[in-house]
């Protein structure tokens, strides 16, 4: 009998949610950056092992929304928790629970969902500090399992999978056995490009960018991708392009390398930069970029 289940991964920004999911799958489906608020959408990562199919749901980091995009991201988290069969709360093992973790634990209790506490970044602390953190969280909630990990190294990720398997239920799989994500190819391409913007640019500029894939087609044995990078200020456009176009070329080179590895095709990547002021506070523009809060109701 086949089994399946939706397991949401929640936590504050920059705690390792996307890194954990990529290691759970053994494939990179969520973009990763040391900058907070990297993930904007709920992303499903699909792991099929034997008769079991896990659907892990990577979510945006929980933060206080400062614009309409932030509101969309937080609604995405709440919607994902409500629709899941179980929850993985990931937190930094070196720190006690803060207001964000307390709010997420409140949601877990309210939904009566089974839950796993993953204490990440154990490679950065000693055993005494870890034991203290475990004790502090034990006072807040009776988690079904507590798993210390170093997601960046893949340490104890197999234990997370083992514990998650306890929450699967008998039923038909939702995806083919060779699927690794529910994201359309165009969305994957746009996220890879945005990851490289986060990698190359200064702190604020990449958070004000969005990617639109205008062309995605095979031509003469090459996958042609034309993407438009939208930023909020004219000054940001100059930063993204860089002197003599060098910064944009670097972004394109990094993105093309990852895209060719993911799609297994030769890639021609054509990047353009445009300005759309204050797009993060416009419902109309957010909807055109695919951030539609109505889809989360």
Image: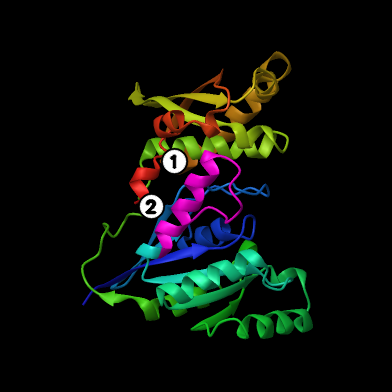
- Farthest top residue in view: 244
5, above or below 17, in the image = below
Q: How far apart are marks 1 and 2 (CA)?
A: 9 Å
User: Which quadrant, please, contains the N terminus?
Assistant: bottom left
Q: Of residues 17 and 185, which is closer to you in this image?
A: 17
Which residue shows up at 45% across the image and 43% down it?
262
Q: Does the magenta stretch include residue 85?
A: no
Circle 2 Cα neighbour tier, 10 Å, few/some/many (<14 / 14–19 / ≥20): many
Q: Residue 188 carries which label?
A: 1
Which residue shows up at 61% across the image and 85% down it?
138
Which residue shows up at 72% across the image and 38% down it?
203
| Residue that numbered label 2 is attached to | 181
Q: Is residue 212 left or right of residue 171?
A: right
Q: Give the range drawn in magenta.
A: 59-81
Q: What element carries label 2?
A: loop
Percent position of residue 144, x then y: 48, 84
Q: Of residues 205 and 262, which is closer to you in this image?
A: 205
Total numbered labels? 2
111, above or below 219, in the image = below
Disc 1, disc 2: CB below 8 Å? yes
Q: Of residues 101 and 220, which is closer to you in this image?
A: 101
Q: Colour mode?
A: rainbow
253, above or below 183, in the image = above
Q: Is residue 70 magenta?
A: yes
264, above or below 7, in the image = above
The quarter of the displayed image where residue 91 is located: bottom right
Percent position of residue 23, x then y: 53, 62
Q: Is mark 1 on a helix, strand or loop?
A: helix
Circle 1 Cα neighbour tier, 10 Å, few/some/many (<14 / 14–19 / ≥20): some
């Amino acid at each position: 009998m086949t089994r399946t289940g939706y397991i949401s991964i929640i936590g504050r920004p920059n705690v390792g949610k996307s890194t954990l999911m990529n290691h759970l799958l053994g494939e990179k489906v969520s973009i990763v950056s040391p900058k907070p608020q990297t993930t904007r959408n709920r992303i499903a990562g699909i792991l099929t092992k034997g008769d079991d199919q896990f659907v892990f749901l990577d979510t945006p980091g929980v933060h206080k929304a400062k614009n309409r995009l932030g509101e969309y991201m937080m609604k995405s988290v709440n919607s994902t928790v409500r629709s899941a069969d179980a929850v993985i709360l990931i937190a930094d093992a070196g720190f006690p629970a803060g207001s964000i973790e307390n709010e997420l634990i409140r949601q877990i209790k309210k939904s009566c969902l089974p839950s796993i506490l993953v204490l990440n970044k154990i490679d950065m602390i000693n055993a005494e500090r870890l034991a203290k953190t475990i004790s502090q969280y034990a006072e807040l909630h009776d988690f079904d399992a507590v798993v210390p990990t170093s997601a960046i190294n893949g340490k104890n990720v197999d234990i997370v999978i083992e514990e998650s398997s306890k929450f699967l239920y008998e039923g038909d799989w939702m995806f083919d056995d060779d699927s690794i994500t529910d994201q359309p190819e165009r969305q994957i391409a746009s996220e890879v490009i945005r990851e490289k913007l986060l990698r190359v640019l200064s702190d604020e500029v990449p958070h004000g960018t969005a990617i639109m894939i205008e062309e995605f087609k095979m031509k003469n044995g090459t996958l042609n991708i034309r993407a438009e990078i939208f930023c909020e200020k004219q000054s940001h456009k100059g930063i993204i392009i860089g002197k003599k176009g060098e910064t944009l070329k670097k972004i394109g080179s990094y993105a093309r390398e990852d895209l060719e590895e993911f799609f297994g095709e030769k890639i021609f990547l054509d990047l353009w930069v445009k300005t759309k002021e204050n797009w993060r506070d416009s419902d109309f523009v957010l909807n055109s970029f695919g951030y539609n809060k109505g889809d989360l109701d």
